[in-house]
Amino acid sequence: MVKLYVNPNIKMGHINSEIYGHFAEHLGRCIYEGIYVGEDSEIPNTNGMRNDVVAALKEMRIPVLRWPGGCFADEYHWKDGIGPKENRKRMVNTHWGGVVEDNSFGTHEFFELCRQLECKTYINGNVGSGTVQEMSEWVEYMTFDGVSPMAELRAKNGHPEPWKVDYFGVGNENWGCGGNMTPEQYALEYRRYQTYVRNYNPEQPILKICGGANVADYEWTRKVLEVTHYHSLKEFHGFMDGLSLHYYTHPEGWEKKGSATDFDEKTWYKTLSKTLFMDTLIKNHGAIMDEFDPDKKIGMIIDEWGTWYTVEPGTNPGFLYQQNTMRDALVAGINLNIFNKHCDRVKMANIAQMVNVLQAVILTEGEKMLLTPTYHVFNMYKYHQDAELLHSKIDTEMIGLEEEYMVPNLHESVSMSKDGKVHVTLNNLSLTDSYDIDGVFVESAVKSVKGTILTNDMKAYNTFENPDNVRPEEFKDYKITDKGISLKIPACSVLHLEIEML
Ligand code: AHR
């Protein structure tokens, strides 16, 4: 019998809702078709946004959305996407698939989408090919409530009231597609650009995100923090509220990537083992951040994560369209548990990407829409949002088929939501074994349990013909005991338990 210990009396930190955030780039069919179809579309929409997609994202409680990129952000000139649509520039999306970008989804449309989703806004500005003036004017356009050229322009374009920008990213991947800069070079640019990301409304401050490292580039983190934390007259200037980190799971490495649906057991464990590397990355980058920011005022913002496979056969390689199996469900479950457990430092995370791109929660085809296994995990985990992380521990053993890619058989995180309910999310990484678990709740008694499970064959996925092939079901294989609960978790599964304490 495996032991799971939960202590409802030990709170380890607050889980920011934004950890469950999303990312939508002008890439492939994410924005166009996937979210925005235009007011004249036959697909049911509200002000151009697909009703089915918006409803599904609201159900999942999407807390924040990052836009417009990604690499696209450092090529995006926001003035191309405002004003009458017929006058907006048509251009080629050079980075992603060489297709026509007609700019019909721009700043106004983004805020309309977030209004419908009732989520926070995360805008990513252009450092790579933009100017300080351009960035500064965008912030003025979006947030200034007074007499100014940009506020006037916004009003002329139909929105007199300013919007709320919750987060603003100063560039994206500036070590790569965002300008191929050195850390010192970017950090100096960051200091200058962020100066003009003005907080026009002190009651609604914009939180500034500095562009962080790729995977294990610890040198980037250190150098950027050194340069931005210039010490003047005994005052430290961090100039940032968050520092980002990007880490994708490529089962077969960056070059080869590997198929989303056609893989073997070895690749299953390899993928999960590579996913677990996220924990090491957070610890190592976090340790460097601790040196500069011991009070953890700067959030680690993992604004791109998820699986990245070879595109679906027959699709545009620049569109990054991939299927989503039970393997992706486990990747999501593990990552989200890791983020919960590091909620003292990780303040936001945005899976890449929301619809039709990489590890999407939603896929669309014409008027059809399906929810992926990853969607179901986000929906099952949503109760962790804005909850308190609880002290928990599970006995694990290492399993796998190759020494290099062994993984723990079980993976968990536990929180208490505002209504006092305890939420356990538990992953069984084994493809063969179910486990009997004895859940011990320290100095507390369990009154009732509600369980939901996602389980299936490792390669199972949803298609437009069979959209409910992988879907959550009620979990009944548990008993309330003197000490807590006992349960049996099946192989290859993600479980959520909502527990009411006495
Ligand atoms: O999410 C796809 C791309 O991955 C993003 O545009 C970029 O930031 C990253 O390299």
Image (cartoon, rainbow, N blue to C red):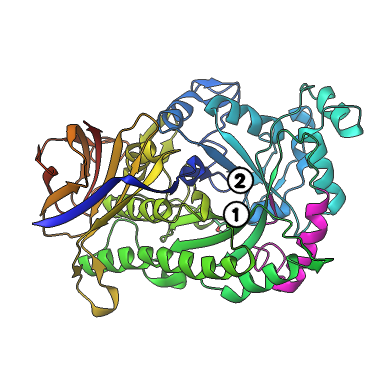
Q: Range of the magenta residues?
A: 169-196
CA separation in Å, label 2 and label 1? 8 Å
Which quadrant holds residue 228? Answer: bottom right
Q: Is mark 1 within 8 Å of ligand 1?
A: yes
Q: Is residue 356 visible?
A: no
Q: Residue at x 82, y 23 (%)?
A: 155
Q: Are marks 2 and 1 in contact (CB under 8 Å)?
A: yes
Residue 373 in the image: x percent, y percent? Answer: 31, 44
Q: Secondary structure at mark 1?
A: loop
Q: Residue 127: within the magenta? A: no
Q: Nearer the viewer, residue 26 or 445?
A: 445
Which quadrant holds residue 108? Answer: top right
Q: Residue at x 33, y 65 (%)?
A: 271
Question: Which quarter of the image is occupied by the C terminus?
Answer: top left
Question: Which quarter of the image is occupied by the N terminus?
Answer: bottom left
Residue position marked by numbered label 1 in the rendering: 96
Q: Residue at x 68, y 64 (%)?
A: 174
**In the current view of this chain or complex, which residue is farthest to the bottom?**
403
Residue 173 in the image: x percent, y percent? Answer: 63, 62
Residue type for callout 1: Trp
Residue type for callout 2: His
Mark 2 residue crowding within 10 angstroms, few (<14) / some (14–19) / many (20+) = many
